[in-house]
Amino acid sequence: MSDDSMLEIYLYENSQLLDEFESLLLTCENTESFSAEQIAELFRILHTIKGSSAMMNFDSIANLSHALEDLFGYMREHNTRKDDYKSISALAFETLDTIKAEIAKIQDGGLPDADVTAITKRIRDFIGLLTGRKEPTPQQDEDPGQGPNGGRPLSGKGYEAKVTFQSEAKMENVRAFGIVSSLEEMCAGIVTDPKDLLENQSADEIVLNGFTLYMMSEEEQSTLEEKIREAFFIQSLDIWEMDDAEVEKIFGPADAGGDDEAKAVSRSVNTGVSIKQNFMSVNLSKLDLLMDIVGEIVITESTVTKNPEVLKLQLDSFEKASRQLRKLTDELQDIVMSIRMVPVSATFHKMERIVRDISVKTDKKAKLTIIGEDTELDKNVLDNLSDPLMHLVRNAMDHGLEQTDVREAAGKDPVGEIVLKARNSGSDVLITISDDGRGLDREKLIQKGIEKGLVDKEKTDITDKEAYSLIFAPGFSTKEEVTEFSGRGVGMDVVAKNIRKIGGSVNVDSSPGKGMQVTIRIPLTLAIIDGMLVSVGDFTYIIPLLSIRDSFKPGKNDVFKDPAGNEMIWLRENCYPIVRLHDVFGIETEVTDISEGILVLVESQSLTYCLFVDDLVGEQQTVVKPMPLYISHNFDTIKGMAGCTILGDGSISLILDINGLVK
Amino acid sequence: MKTVLVVDDAAFMRVSIKNMLTKNGYEVIGEAENGKIAIQKYQDLNPDIVTMDITMPEMDGLASLKKILEVDPSANIVMVSAMGQEGMVREAVQSGAKGFIVKPFKEDVILSALGNLK
């Protein structure tokens, strides 16, 4: 395996571990407690990160995680006072952020080269502070020292062995200890020099000079030597028989014999059941490729099965085979989709950190409630959703929630609540971010809208929804001052833009004094959508089925014109503007009379309107292809176009952007 | 060819060890991400050697070592430790681990250790 893929695994795994760590730490901070299990888990995560990072020679990360591991290691062994928790989590968060930044450097192809001495020193100092302040609880040191105890119950001959270890061995004293343990069964008595192998001083001495073993044993010298050589990383081993005087000096005068302990061991039979690894990680780019290919197959499938020449032949067997093919491609598509689906939980839990950070800095008390974190979304969609969500949560924290005293004065719970909720709704996923803050001020929004030239002065006919939607208009911001978190008014329109980019829509609702709610509706996946094929003149277009509310053949008398000359239609007590597609795109068509064509009622995020088309061709699953580079490079966006697709007959059709068709 | 079961909760470490060993004439016949799975896999696969991480979720390497040795006292288990785990390593060695290596280690270190096994 190449170094690159090792790095990939390293990055993948450690990013996950860091996320886990972060969410665990947040839980601890919120509950103001560190349970034994939580500490053990935090410790374990850091330990794993340390190990992998050290293997990769990422010293800064290894050092950081090591220092923090020691802190949690300390907490594991000792009770910490509650008033230390704040400092602990602050230190932990800071370290975590530094590690994340280092990981980001690696991801960007750089090296983690931050100077971490200051922060590790602070952690160590803090551990020092904790240690110094308290009586350390006794270490669990249950094993007795090795060496002669009492008289000399020894039989056999005395041997002396001098052992040194290779320089890369590490933990030499434990290795020495291991050798002693392995010899215990063979020897009636063992004495070592240095005496207590596990003391710190001994460790240093063993590294430098090795250690000496004095053994009383009935075994042959060669047997003992062989046993010692089983230990790893032995640099040198000299063993010889001691004379009686030496034996007496070490083990005391001769006495009675010792006893052996018998060990009964049994070996159980293999069960023959094998456990298979149920999960594996796959490079996302491979999944993208797979998705592309499946997309191509879907297109090719309809090119083949809907081939007009073949259809003319009316072959039963062909029909049957096509159906089977269709079924299989559907299944294939479903499976590929499901592979790409990931739960929103990780993305949602990231928001906890934002709430926490802003809450600390602005001194607003807030909690984040997460509902429906198991809801799944296409990985690409979810990745693109992370930033908009972050903005929305920031916005709710910053502008939505009031200061604690204001809330108390208004008789509200002093702790503000932000609810992040995801649920499935048909082929969409609905994500709502709601807060119980002050809500939007309709009049203020409209006022601002007029100032910015976004709203006509006759504001009487602006619906609440339209007023609230203003916050997503480019350059619109009701806050005069710019805060650290919410940025400068670019936020919300970028949010809306990004969500539209992934095929979603945003809606705002608000009730003054009670809070606001932003609803994001996103398709489960981007790559394949259900579309309605419509014809205009010689062209066909695809309207995403998601945007279509209704389609109907209008009567001549249903249509009227507003004072400005715009066509409108009354429908179920609502009045909708009509947009003639052939006018928008300048297409010549014979169908210009409203009563001859079809009206498709579509819902954009700001407006519900009727699209006038020649005819409906039919529903079709559509593989969304991005616009070719030479188009997308030269034009920022093409009005009314969301992308293109290839139809069953091989021709290209454009997918309409319902939001972009009207202003 | 000697067969090895690699036990570590970090996929990265499993892959690292696997790479080092497969390049040098060992066959990694199984991987386990915690001590519990390791016990099961040990019984299923009967490997010649086990490399055993210490700190793992569910069941740590120490407990797993003891269980495996209960089943097969002749098991060749090599602990993979990090600095700072002297106590655990000591217990492991006392309990019958054949030895240990300390992270971070290079290829020659793990080869030297495993080469020392009978």
Image (spheres, rainbow, N blue to C red):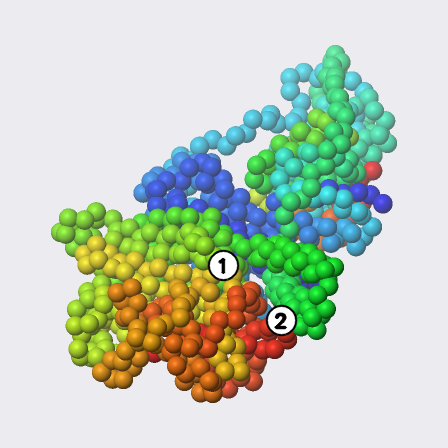
Residue drawn 64% across and 17% down? A150
Residue drawn 52% across and 65% down? A619
Label 2's element? loop
The quadrant of the rendering that contains the N terminus of chain A is bottom right
| Viewer-side residue, A533 vs A493 | A533
Residue A161 visible? The answer is no
Which picture quadrant has residue A304? bottom right
The chain to which mark 2 is attached is: A
Above or below, B18 relative to A269: below
| Viewer-side residue, A94 vs A198 | A94
The quadrant of the rendering that contains the C terminus of chain A is bottom left
Above or below, A460 relative to B107: below
Q: On the image, numbered disc 1 is attached to which residue? A: A524
Image x and y of residue A492, in percent: 33, 69
Q: Which amino acid does label 2 sit on?
A: Gly
Residue drawn 67% across and 66% down? A305
